[in-house]
Amino acid sequence: FFFVGSDQRKKFNGVVGIIHSQAKEDNFSLLKFESRLSYQPTNALNISLAPEYSISKSKTQYVTQADYSNATRYILGTIDNHTLTASVRFDYTINPNLSIQYYGQPFISRGRYNDFKYVTNPVADLLNDRFQNYDSSQISINGDDFQVDDNRDGIMDYSFENPDFSFVQFNSNLVLRWEYIPGSELFLVWSQGVTSSISSSNGLFEGFETGILDECPQNIFLLKATYRFIL
């Protein structure tokens, strides 16, 4: 990992960095780009943004299992997973007794599978000895399903659903806090959330538009009051 940051005492400061992880035999890998930006123009106002983009790959991602010839086939795939997320914060102190806070986080994750295989020896020393890849004569896609002719006799032995996915989520909270008398507070909360699964053919930014902006959010309003008794 490698990170570079600026002086946090400044009104505008930030940190940017990269994280890379690689397993033996290229079994899995992770590449993540992170940044945290903060702007505080006055003592009462702070705005921050923390976007992240990651790419994770794994050769042995579990997909499903199927019955075949009085045994169970544990099916794996190679997954290429891209995730984009960002945290947005807004804090404003109107006076010592009254403040507003906002938090929002869009989350978009897209996974693509290929190189399907089944487990043969899960404890083998070498990664490639733990599974057997399906070749082009054994597996084919039909609509949203993969059909498998395990013994190559021209007859489908089992099938499984295409595991590709695109998942989109957005959560936000807006909180108004008022300390109406010392030690006693009133909170007004507006919580908003969107969760959807969209076509796996969509890209990350297409997923943001169709999965968040075009969806009807769920809204929750809460009112909470506390009162401090002084005896």
Image (spheres, rainbow, N blue to C red):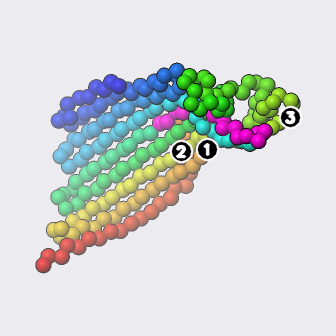
Of callouts 3 and 2, the N-terminal one: 3
Q: What is the residue that sits farthest to the bottom in this orientation?
A: 231
User: What is the spatial separation of the Cα atoms under label 1 and label 2, in whole angstroms?
Assistant: 7 Å
User: Which labelled disc corresponds to residue 155?
Assistant: 3
User: Which labelled disc corresponds to residue 198?
Assistant: 1
Corner quadrant of residue 163: top right
User: What is the spatial separation of the Cα atoms under label 3 and label 1, in whole angstroms?
Assistant: 33 Å
**Residue visible at 17% across and 58% down?**
96
SS at circle 3: loop
Q: Residues within 10 Å of mark 2 (few under 14, many from 20)?
A: many
Q: What is the residue that sits farthest to the right in this orientation?
A: 154
Q: Amino acid at mark 2?
A: Val
Front residue of this view, candidates 79 and 221: 79
Residue at image mark 2: 168
**Residue visible at 41% across and 35% down?**
52
Please state, as top left, top right, bottom left or bottom right, where the N terminus lies in the image. top left
> Residue 73 at x, y = what percent?
70, 38
Q: Amino acid at mark 1?
A: Ile
Instruction: Answer whether residue 42 is magenta in the image.
Output: no
Q: Which residues are magenta?
A: 68-84
- Residue 173 horizontal side relative to residue 160, left or right: left
SS at circle 1: loop
Is the magenta region chiefly helix, strand or loop? Answer: strand
**Residue visible at 70% across and 40% down?**
72
